[in-house]
Image (cartoon, rainbow, N blue to C red):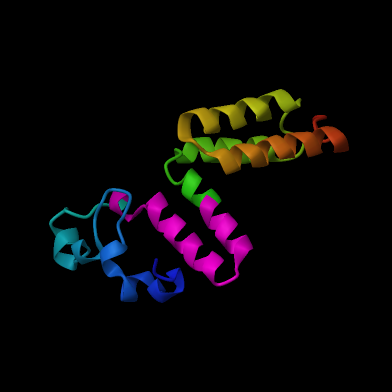
Amino acid sequence: MTDPRDLYPLSEKAPEKVRTASGLSLADFTLEAVLEGRVTPADLAIAPEMLRLQADVARASARDRLAENLERAAELARVPQALILDTYELLRPGRAQSAAPMRERAAELLRDYGAKRIAALIDEAADVYERRGLFSKRF
């Protein structure tokens, strides 16, 4: 296998590997394509595969924390923005009344989007919130 560090930066050293969530390649992004409507704002969304490839580069460069963040981002890439924002609000101290809504959200993200790392993070947060008494309504 090729050392992932040899691919960085992807746009220069491995442009054939770069794809958007809608499947467009870098070569598809031209001013002409934009003006003709062949490239839309939805085409700018990053694909989970690209985030995982970036995570491989980070891990090969001994940047494990960055790799973990990119892997979590890959899990969230296909989650609707409204659900991400609602989850963010749920995770703010004092927003959830108990661990139950947090655990339900973790289960939903795991079941519907395969977001194992994110679900584990939310479950861990629920444990910490219980231990620290952060479920009481603060606002």
Q: Quadrant of the N terminus?
A: bottom left
Residue at x-position 16% and y-position 60%: 33
* Residue 97 left/right relative to 67: right
* Picture quadrant of residue 25: bottom left
Residue 83 visible in image: yes
73 is within the stretch colored magenta: no
The image shows residue 22 at horizontal and vertical percentages of: 28, 48
* Residue 21 left/right relative to 126: left
**Residue 134, above or below 77:** above
Residue located farthest toward the front when viewing the structure as drawn: 1
Residue at x-position 59% and y-position 28%: 107
* Residue 137 left/right relative to 100: right
**Residue 110, above or below 8:** above
Q: Which range is magenta? A: 42-71
The image shows residue 16 at horizontal and vertical percentages of: 25, 65
The image shows residue 119 at horizontal and vertical percentages of: 61, 37
Number of marks in picture: 0
* Picture quadrant of residue 63: bottom right
Q: Quadrant of the C terminus?
A: top right
Residue at x-position 66% and y-position 42%: 121
**Residue 37, above or below 107:** below
Main secondary-structure element of the magenta-colored stretch: helix
54 is within the stretch colored magenta: yes
**Residue 33, above or below 125:** below
The image shows residue 13 at horizontal and vertical percentages of: 33, 75
Residue 133 visible in image: no
* Residue 22 left/right relative to 132: left
Residue at x-position 20% and y-position 66%: 27
Residue situated in front as seen by the camera: 49 or 76 = 49
* Picture quadrant of residue 20: bottom left
